Image (cartoon, rainbow, N blue to C red):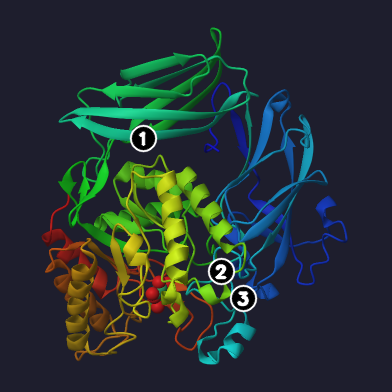
């Protein structure tokens, strides 16, 4: 569904930011009718995770079910419209009731879910919304879960984290993005899919495919408006056709150097009457791989950026707009041009900023460290469903230039992965993703344990590698680290003949820790390691970029390897720059130019 907006045909109201809250570790709420409301004097802010907001109630590491409720007044003028409820994201799964009636559930975190609540909502009255949210995971979920028993059975008890997780970030629970009630006409745009092409030096093409709910329309019109308000192209169809092309002369293409956005205004008509309108900001650009180069509008582009997380003090993974503004400022300050939404799709509000500011994005699905020994019967289906929702949600963002459909499969180094099962799995997911979008390169970052025979390389358009030589391997030894990195990049490229992207490298550093010798955990060691990696990566003509792990320190599940946070940020969790940030700023100002 399209992001809610307000215009003559659509209205919206955001839910109040404070909700009643109750944890339900025994999972008795549904049986006891909590969907009709429940007793509690605890309030929680939304968007926001429960973990740090309600640490004093013992929820810092809580994995389980919790209930949210809220009474909201729905204005009378929503009457006669179709009424929708959008939960921007609830991690990792949720169920929703309106006025005691069940309206649906969502088994995918990190993505929005829109519920048609027309038959349940009362206009001109107060309504009750109750949401049950769980941050539990299992063998079939995306991300895949893990339990203490898994670790015990595999004799990997030293690797176990608390809470147990197959990933290195806190499994924060809660409603993490805005909850919005909105209205549309009964016949309305459900989706607009925009493809853009470059036809000539300054000629662009915009192909629009509309998905429409209801059949009370007979024509469709789109116009493209520039930033001066001038209509630069328009087109209309009749006879219920839903595809339109626009050709734009004197076109200003979107790039990270010039992130020019046009407004695409679409209207749906019945006779001469307009019944729905939707306006979308779009950028006209083309991304492609040619040989070992990544080309944006035909020009070579080199990615200088980070893996990030949605993570902040107290808010947890909750969308916190001051932080979004700050992080983009810092990305510009440090002269980076890109980030990867490791390890899950980020809030749409973040991608809108990236479009506007010209920051390039790799959007990632949370199939993290997939362990094919434990892939349940529904995993493939869920993985595909996740990718398809992500592609649908992010398709129109010019900033999104690459899909990553997983991260570090087979981190346990299981031999059976190479005997065909890994290949079969990834071939199917890659084919499926290409069938949804063949305009963007697709990749899956590989880890050292996955090795150079990892089947993801065969199907990826870009050879993405996460490497921690000088940290997990060859700790404290930068010379061996860089030799090994360089050798491996050459071998990888020789084997697959595709461009290489180093999607992760870095070292933990404790802000304020210093040494004049190379000493792990100091700011100097982190800074030096990053500098040496960058030098090595940029010396290879086959590379298309470097992404430092991580932008900022972030909370992880408990493990003896982590002192509360993963400290590989070049900024602290509260966004103070470490030494490496100043060094990167200099390096990126001086080095390979982007478009
Ligand atoms: C990785 C993972 C990332 C971790 C990082 C680390 O390879 O992709 O999620 O946080 O290593 O610091 O260990």
Is residue 539 depicted above or below 13 in this figure? below
Contact, mark 3 vs mark 1 (Cβ under 8 Å)? no
Q: CA distance from mark 2 to mark 1?
A: 32 Å
Q: Where does the image place residue 107, in percent across and percent down from the top left?
A: 64, 56
The structure residue drawn at horizontal position 23% and vertical position 33%, both measured from the top left corner, is 198
Q: Where does the image place residue 241, in percent across and percent down from the top left?
A: 49, 20
- Label 1 belongs to which residue? 195
> Is residue 473 toward the left or the right of residue 477 in the image?
right
- Is the residue marked by circle 2 packed among few (<14), some (14-19), or many (20+) residues within 10 Å? many
User: In this orientation, does residue 213 appear?
Assistant: yes
| Rendered-image quadrant of the N terminus | top right
Nearer the observer, 20 or 184: 184
Nearer the observer, 582 or 30: 30
- Label 2 belongs to which residue? 144
Label 3 or label 1, whichever comes before in sequence order: 3
- Is the residue marked by circle 3 packed among few (<14), some (14-19), or many (20+) residues within 10 Å? some
User: Which dot, 3 or 2, sits closer to the camera?
Assistant: 2
Label 2 or label 1, whichever comes before in sequence order: 2
Is residue 216 depicted above or below 48 in this figure? above
């Amino acid at each position: 569904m399209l992001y809610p907006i307000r215009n003559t045909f659509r209205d919206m109201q955001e839910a109040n930011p404070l909700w009643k809250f109750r944890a339900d570790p025994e999972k008795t709420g549904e049986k006891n009718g909590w969907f009709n409301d429940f007793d509690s004097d605890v309030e929680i802010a939304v968007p926001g995770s429960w973990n740090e907001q309600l640490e004093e109630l013992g929820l810092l590491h809580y994995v389980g079910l919790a209930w949210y409720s809220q009474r909201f007044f729905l204005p009378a003028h929503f009457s006669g419209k179709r009424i929708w409820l959008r939960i921007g994201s609830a991690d990792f799964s949720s169920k929703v009731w309106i006025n005691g009636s069940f309206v649906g559930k969502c088994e995918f975190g990190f993505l929005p879910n829109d519920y048609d609540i027309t038959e349940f909502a009362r206009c001109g009255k107060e309504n009750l919304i109750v949401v049950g949210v769980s941050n539990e995971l299992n063998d079939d979920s995306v991300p895949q879960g893990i339990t203490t028993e898994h670790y015990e059975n595999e004799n990997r008890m030293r690797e176990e984290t608390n809470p147990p997780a197959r990933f290195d970030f806190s499994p924060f629970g809660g409603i993490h993005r805005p909850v919005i009630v909105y209205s549309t006409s009964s016949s309305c745009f459900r989706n607009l899919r925009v493809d853009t092409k470059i036809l000539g030096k300054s000629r662009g093409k915009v192909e629009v495919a509309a998905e429409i709910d209801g059949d009370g329309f007979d024509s469709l019109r789109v116009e493209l408006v520039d930033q001066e308000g001038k209509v630069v192209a328009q087109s209309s169809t009749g006879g219920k056709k839903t595809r339109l092309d626009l050709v734009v002369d004197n076109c200003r293409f979107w790039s990270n150097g010039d992130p020019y956005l046009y407004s695409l205004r679409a209207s749906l008509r019945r006779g001469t009457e307009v019944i729905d309108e939707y306006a979308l900001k779009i950028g006209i650009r083309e991304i492609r791989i040619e040989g070992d180069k990544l080309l944006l509008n035909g020009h070579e582009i080199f990615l200088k950026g980070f893996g990030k997380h949605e993570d902040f003090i107290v808010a947890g993974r909750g969308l916190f707009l001051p932080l979004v503004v700050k992080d983009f400022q810092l990305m510009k300050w440090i002269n980076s041009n890109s980030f990867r939404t490791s390890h899950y799709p980020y809030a749409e509000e973040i991608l809108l900023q990236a479009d506007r500011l010209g920051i390039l994005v790799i959007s990632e699905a949370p199939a993290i460290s997939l362990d094919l020994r434990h892939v349940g019967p529904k995993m493939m289906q869920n993985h595909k469903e996740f990718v398809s929702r992500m592609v649908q949600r992010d398709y129109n963002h010019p900033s999104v230039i690459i899909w990553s459909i997983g991260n570090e499969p087979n981190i346990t180094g299981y031999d059976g992965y190479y005997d065909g099962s890994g290949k079969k799995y990834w071939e199917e997911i890659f084919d499926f993703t290409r069938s949804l979008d063949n305009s963007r390169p697709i990749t899956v970052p590989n880890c050292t344990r996955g090795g150079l025979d990892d089947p993801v390389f065969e199907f990826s358009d870009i050879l993405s590698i996460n490497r921690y030589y000088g940290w997990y391997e060859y700790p404290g030894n930068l010379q061996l680290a860089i030799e090994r990195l360089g050798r491996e990049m050459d071998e990888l490229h020789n084997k697959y003949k595709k461009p290489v992207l180093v999607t992760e490298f870095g070292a933990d550093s404790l802000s304020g820790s210093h040494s004049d010798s190379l000493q792990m955990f100091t700011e100097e060691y982190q800074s030096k390691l990053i500098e040496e990696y960058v030098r090595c990566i940029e010396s290879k003509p086959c590379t298309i970029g470097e992404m430092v792990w991580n932008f900022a320190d972030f909370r992880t599940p408990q493990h003896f390897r982590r002192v509360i946070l993963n400290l590989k940020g070049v900024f602290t969790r509260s966004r103070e720059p470490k030494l490496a940030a100043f060094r990167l700023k200099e390096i990126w100002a001086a080095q390979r130019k982007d478009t």
